[in-house]
Image (cartoon, rainbow, N blue to C red):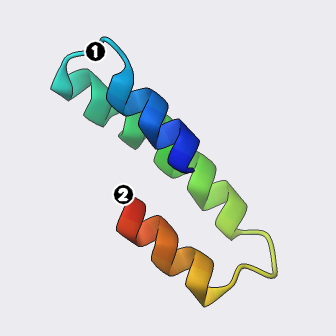
Amino acid sequence: LEDTLERIRKAPLKPAQKLATVRDYLIPSLEYRLGVPGISRKLLESVDGAI
């Protein structure tokens, strides 16, 4: 997650494009992973803090 966010931050995109990337790519991939059993509360809190 941190690596992906850092790549988005450093990408030569306009701010609106970065937000769209987070909305259209990053959040759906996180939603998919959250469907997998065994996700801890600590991991969820770190994801929330990172975004």
Query: At 39% across and 39% down in the image, what residue appears?
Result: 22
Residue 51's label in the rendered image is: 2
For mark 1, what is the residue?
13
Q: Position of residue 44 (x, y in %)?
A: 54, 77
Q: Quadrant of residue 15?
A: top left
How many badges with numbers are in the image?
A: 2
Q: Which is more N-terminal, label 2 or label 1?
A: 1
Instruction: Answer left or right for 8 relative to 37.
Output: left
Looking at the image, residue 44 sits to the left or right of residue 16; the answer is right
Question: The residue under label 2 is which amino acid type?
Answer: Ile
Residue 16, placed above or below residue 24: above
Towards the viewer: 35 or 48: 48
Q: Where is residue 17, by image quadrant?
A: top left
Residue at left offset 54%, top offset 38% = 4
Q: In which quadrant of the rendered image does the C terminus lie?
A: bottom left
Name which residue lies at 47% across and 79% down.
Answer: 45
